[in-house]
Image (cartoon, rainbow, N blue to C red):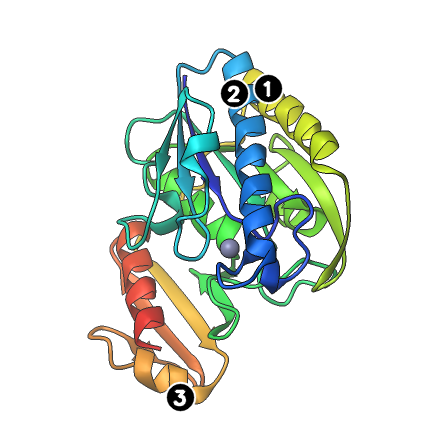
Amino acid sequence: MKVFISVDMEGISGVSCWDDVDPGKPSYARFRRVMTAEVNAAVDGALQAQAAAVLVNDSHGGMRNVLIEELNYRAELISGWPKPLGMMTGVDSGVDVAFLIGCHARAGTPHAIMDHTWSGSRVYRLTVNGQELGEVGLNAALAGHFGVPVALVAGDRAVTEEARALLGPNLVTCAVKEALSRESVRCLPPERAHGMLRAAALRALRESPPAPLVIESPVTISVDFVNSLQAEAAGSLPGARRTGGRTVEWTGEDVIAAFHGMVAMLALS
Ligand SMILES: [Zn+2]
């Protein structure tokens, strides 16, 4: 069994505001260490469940957060940006199952730590074939394209609820904290949160996972931007259709093509 772990940062235990996830701010150094320890907890759980290999993809911001020198020696790390499948780079390399950890809820979710979808300053709302998805949904769809199920989602309580609503009751979730507002949380010390995550990872591999999330082709991703200027810029991408003042959509032959269209639109915006 080969396990893929995509790790974001907003949903890591103890992280409570944008400063904590911003390399330019003093608290970031603390929380990248906590993030690395949280990855190790998930890796430990996977190894306890007899995983043969664990591939970790750093998925936050510039995607260079995890401290390689503190990572479990049996794991491998993908670090840096840009990369072919963004937060899911590596999921196409023959893995059997995916974990998404450190996750946050989609833009517009109440009582959710730093809720956003891809970019808080640019994306107001995102739909895939008409269904509103956040990063967890989009990432599960990218995994699903390669037949890989998401078996575990960890982060704040709001994202675990979002993920279960999308992927069903077979999904194992681990809420390491509960948001009181967009920038305040009630959280557990890492030692306890990591114990929970280790147990959740073990359980996720012992139980049967949800079915891979497969999006029917062709796939249209529609983005409601925060303002119309961003939509103006994104709309200049060849193939993009501006369907509203702040809305642009792009259709691809499958979810991978649509994802690349979305990344290009967001880069232009
Ligand atoms: Zn992030």
Tag 1 or tag 3, which sits nearer the N-term? 1
Vertical side of 27 occupied by 1: above or below? above
Q: CA distance from mark 2 to mark 3?
A: 45 Å
Q: Secondary structure at mark 1?
A: helix
Picture coordinates of residue 255 (x, y %)?
Answer: 33, 52
Give the residue number, with chain letter if any, for mark 3: 229
Which of disc 2 and disc 1 is earlier in sequence?
Answer: 2
| Vertical arrangement, residue 124 with respect to residue 37, above or below | below
* Amino acid at circle 3: Leu
Indicate which disc residue 202 carries: 1
User: Dot 3: within a 10 Å radius of its alpha carbon, few (fewer than 14), some, or many (20 or more) residues?
Assistant: few
Residue of label 2: 46
* Secondary structure category for the residue under label 2: helix
**Which residue is pictured at 74% across the width and 31% down the height?**
192
Q: Looking at numbered disc 2 in the image, what kind of residue is underneath it?
A: Ala
Residue at 70% of width from left, 28% of height from top?
A: 196
Q: CA distance from mark 3 to mark 1?
A: 47 Å
Of callouts 2 and 3, which one flags the residue occurring earlier in the amino acid sequence? 2
The structure residue drawn at horizontal position 45% and vertical position 52%, both measured from the top left corner, is 138
Asked if disc 1 is less than 8 Å from ligand 1, the answer is: no
Tell me if label 1 and label 2 are in contact, CB under 8 Å: yes
At horizontal 39% and vertical 56% (from top left) the residue drawn is 62
